[in-house]
């Protein structure tokens, strides 16, 4: 039985909207709003913040309007923040230990549903969840999946867990036809996963990618000669991809593990170009971990190993430039980005196999990030704006990352209101993709925005972020 959402319809009218004007403001068809009010469906995750603003209520109040006897809180399917790494690992708050999940302050049923929604898959038995501490900070912690789901299931039932799907579902083993070339087939599957990651984020991809690694290892046992070497090369490519997925999930230790395996396997496959690419990616990972010396050294190693004037050399220059910014050396940082731009815009005769996504817009986005680290917030804001406009529509997760970083720069160059509005847009993408890079930036901004808590846009953003977090007792 479908129950009409009369309170939602009344809230729309009180906010001064017809179904048509609300639909226009959201960029959807009027029939979409009609279905919501009839109890047939709910907004996409990235619409919640904007819809709440249009209806002039808090996001947690909006979610309550979508709650009916036959329809658990819509927030139960939101999948936000994995743990964000920092140079100094955060202290685990009281009540979040392996045997103490029952101490969590979860509030009412709607908020308990958020517990399932506020986690993202990592390894098979653990999830990372965002938590707001008693002093107002946002940190990210690792919890056993079983304990977390048990807490939520007690309130909402096992049916909700099956609806949650993605991160908790285990991938089915692949079965390849004997007349299919396994190397070609596995490369095609990997390209499909890369496309999925660009849109949906790592949580829906990482388990499948690791399952593919296991499958390749099985295939290698029955192969010999060149076939075995080619499979080793594909295995290295998958390992590098797994490293990236864990990096975006905020699990830097797992990312390092997979990057190290990728280096080992690319060496065994005698793929020099892939080894250079992975070395450059390890420099990027070091930069995300706030280890500037490691980032600079690995980037310089990649540049030495790369063919002179190549795109891989440009990749090393980009990640080395950010390492220099973290060291406070603005001149060396800008020289690195200038070199990278020169290399990526230089006409080339050879086919681009690795790092084909590296273009002028990407270099400028990374430069903007470094300018923000160096305190040149106006130039950083301008750089992020250009990079966001240049992004392909399919790079939705990267758009969220750039928006989140831009919000941090806007706080200093434009003001808290614009920063909060940009952050809210990034948050909606972070919720749907589970990217820790987005949430790491937003968690940092959240603390900086505390002093402007009387600004309406700031309050809305912080409440929206807070609504997808656990809370320390």
Image (cartoon, rainbow, N blue to C red):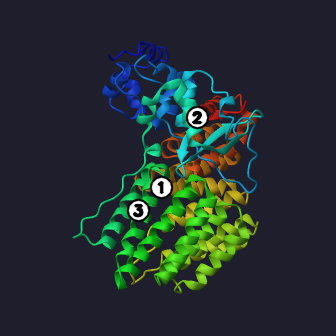
Q: How many marks?
A: 3
For the residue labelled by badge 3, is the local secondary structure a helix, a strand or a loop? helix
Circle on res. 212: 3
Query: Which residue carries the number 1 mark?
Result: 206
Circle on res. 295: none
Residue 353 appears in view: no
Which label's residue is closer to the chain start, 2 or 3? 3
Disc 3/disc 1 C-alpha distance (Å): 10 Å
| Quarter of the picture holding the N terminus | top left
Q: Residue at x 54, y 51 (%)?
A: 122
- What percent of the width, then of the height, locates residue 128? 60, 45
Image side of residue 451 versus residue 202, left or right: right
In this view, the residue in front, 443 or 209, is 209
- What percent of the width, then of the height, locates residue 56? 54, 22
Image: 365 above or below 308: above
Q: Residue at x 33, y 65 (%)?
A: 188
Q: Residue at x 49, y 36 (%)?
A: 78
């Amino acid at each position: 039985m479908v129950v009409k959402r009369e309170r939602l319809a009344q809230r729309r009218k009180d906010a001064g909207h017809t179904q048509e004007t609300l639909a226009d403001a959201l960029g959807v068809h009027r029939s979409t709003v009609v279905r919501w009010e009839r109890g047939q469906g709910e907004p996409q995750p990235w619409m919640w913040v904007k819809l709440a603003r249009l209806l002039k209520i808090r996001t947690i109040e909006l979610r309550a309007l979508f709650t009916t006897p036959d329809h658990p809180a819509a927030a139960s399917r939101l999948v936000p923040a994995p743990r964000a790494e920092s140079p100094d690992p955060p202290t685990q708050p009281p009540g979040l230990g392996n045997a103490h999940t029952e101490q969590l302050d979860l509030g009412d049923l709607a908020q308990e549903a958020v517990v399932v929604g506020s986690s993202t898959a990592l390894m098979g038995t653990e999830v990372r969840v965002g938590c707001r501490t008693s002093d107002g900070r946002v940190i990210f912690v690792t919890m056993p999946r079983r304990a977390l789901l048990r807490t939520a299931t007690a309130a909402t039932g096992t049916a909700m867990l099956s609806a949650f799907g993605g991160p908790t579902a285990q991938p089915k083993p692949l079965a390849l036809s004997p007349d299919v070339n396994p190397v070609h087939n596995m490369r095609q599957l990997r390209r499909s996963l890369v496309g999925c990651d660009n849109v949906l984020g790592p949580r829906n991809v990482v388990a499948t990618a690791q399952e593919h690694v296991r499958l390749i290892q099985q295939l290698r046992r029955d192969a010999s000669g060149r076939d075995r070497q080619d499979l080793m090369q594909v295995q290295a490519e998958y390992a590098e991809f797994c490293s990236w997925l864990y990096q975006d999930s905020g699990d830097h230790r797992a990312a390092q593990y997979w990057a190290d395996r990728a280096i080992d396997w690319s060496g065994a496959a005698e793929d020099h170009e892939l080894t250079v690419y992975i070395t450059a990616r390890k420099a990027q990972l070091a930069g995300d971990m706030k280890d500037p010396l490691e980032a600079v050294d690995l980037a310089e190693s990649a540049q030495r190993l790369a063919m002179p004037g190549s795109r891989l050399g440009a990749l090393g220059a980009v990640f080395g430039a950010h390492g220099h910014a973290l060291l406070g050396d603005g001149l060396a940082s800008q020289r690195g980005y200038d070199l990278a731009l020169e290399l990526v815009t230089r006409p080339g005769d050879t086919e681009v196999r690795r790092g084909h996504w590296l273009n002028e817009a990407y270099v400028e986005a990374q430069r903007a990030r470094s300018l923000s680290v160096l305190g040149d917030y106006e130039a950083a804001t301008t750089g992020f704006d250009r990079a966001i406009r240049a992004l392909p529509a399919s790079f939705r997760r990267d758009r969220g990352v750039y928006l989140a970083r831009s919000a941090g720069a806007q706080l200093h160059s434009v003001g808290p209101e614009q920063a909060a509005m940009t952050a809210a847009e990034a948050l909606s993408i972070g919720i749907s993709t589970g990217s820790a890079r987005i949430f790491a930036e937003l968690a940092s901004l959240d603390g900086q925005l505390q002093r402007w808590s009387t600004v309406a846009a700031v309050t809305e953003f912080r409440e929206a972020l807070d609504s997808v977090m656990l809370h320390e007792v």
